[in-house]
Image (spheres, coloured by chain):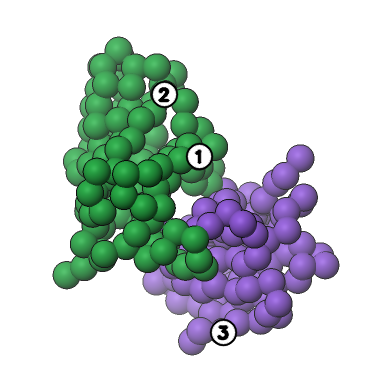
């Protein structure tokens, strides 16, 4: 069956450390992958997009990698801050599916001061 | 300011009643989407529309209906046929539905069935 899975348990880290979130998928061949941030009771906000032929993408303190052999994406936040505390969602887009996205269940990140 | 608005923010419904959730965007985007989010779960696609007067079922369309009469509006009706409608509903849009784009989300409507 097709699945997209993120760390099911909440991730708790200390301020200043690097947070690493995982997104694994099975039986999909995504054209690209996106990461979103969602705060409680709010809509998700787009962070980064990476295409299947890209290995790594960076934006300020954020970095995402995409390994189509391992079927995995890693999302890193360096020098984490309490304001980074939120739920992070990964989403796949498949070939010939237009703009449709398939979302993971999200990982809750908590950064302690 | 450009963006997506959803109303109301909170909605309560009695069992057996239909209810319509509003979604409006002034971003001039072609494609619009409706998702449902349950606690601890990802977003699941209900319906989407890539152009005015056209829409397609998503993964969980049963018990829902939509219309797309105007580019800026994509209302969702939750009918009495939806067995478990209590959830957080999110509307999103993208500039073009057939190409690689980030999705812009509204603030959501939390529907509770009493």
Location of the C terminus of chain A (image quadrant): bottom left
Labelled disc at residue B98: none
Chain ID of residue with mark 1: B
The reply to whether discs 3 and 2 touch (Cβ–Cβ < 8 Å) is no
Residue with the mark numbered 2: B63
Relative image position of residue A45 (x, y in whole percent): 40, 64
* Residue lying at 33% horizontally and 35% vertically, measured from the top left: B66
Residue with the mark numbered 3: A58
User: For numbered disc 2, what is the local secondary structure?
Assistant: loop
User: Which of pointers 1 and 3 indicates the residue nearer the eye?
Assistant: 1
Using the image, determine if residue B79 lies above or below residue B95. Answer: above
Q: Nearer the viewer, residue B12 or B54?
A: B54
* Residue lying at 70% horizontally and 46% vertically, measured from the top left: A3
**Colour applied to chain B:** green
Q: Nearer the viewer, residue B85 or B56?
A: B56
Relative image position of residue B78 (x, y in whole percent): 33, 27
Of all chains in the rendering, the one displayed in purple is A
Tags 1 and 3 both on a single chain: no
Chain ID of residue with mark 3: A
User: For numbered disc 3, what is the local secondary structure?
Assistant: strand
Relative image position of residue B7 (x, y in whole percent): 20, 44
Q: Residues within 10 Å of mark 2 (few under 14, many from 20)?
A: some
User: For numbered disc 1, what is the local secondary structure?
Assistant: loop
Residue with the mark numbered 1: B58
* Residue lying at 17% horizontally and 70% vertically, measured from the top left: B1
Q: Quadrant of residue A39?
A: bottom left
Relative placement, left or right, of A108 versus A24 is left
How far, Cα to Cα, is label 3 from label 2? 41 Å
Q: Is residue A43 visible?
A: no
Q: How many marks?
A: 3
């Amino acid at each position: 069956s097709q699945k997209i899975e993120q760390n099911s348990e909440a991730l708790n880290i200390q301020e200043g450390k690097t947070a690493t979130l995982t997104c694994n998928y099975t039986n999909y061949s995504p054209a690209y992958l996106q990461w979103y941030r969602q705060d409680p009771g709010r809509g998700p906000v787009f962070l980064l997009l990476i295409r299947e032929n890209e290995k790594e993408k960076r934006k300020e303190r954020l970095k995402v990698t995409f390994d189509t052999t391992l079927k995995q994406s890693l999302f890193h936040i360096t020098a984490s801050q309490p304001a980074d505390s939120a739920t992070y969602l990964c989403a796949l887009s498949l070939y010939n599916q237009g703009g449709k996205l398939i979302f993971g269940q999200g990982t809750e990140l908590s950064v302690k001061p | 300011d450009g963006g997506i608005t959803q109303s109301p923010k909170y909605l309560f419904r009695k069992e057996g009643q239909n209810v319509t959730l509003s979604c409006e965007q002034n971003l001039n985007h072609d494609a619009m989407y409706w998702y449902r989010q349950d606690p601890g779960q990802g977003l699941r696609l209900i319906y989407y529309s890539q152009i005015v007067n056209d829409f397609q079922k998503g993964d969980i369309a049963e018990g829902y209906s939509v219309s797309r009469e105007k580019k800026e509006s994509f209302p969702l009706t939750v009918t009495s046929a939806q067995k478990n409608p209590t959830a957080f509903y999110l509307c999103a849009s993208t500039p073009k539905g057939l190409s690689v784009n980030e999705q812009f989300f509204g603030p959501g409507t939390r529907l509770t069935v009493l």
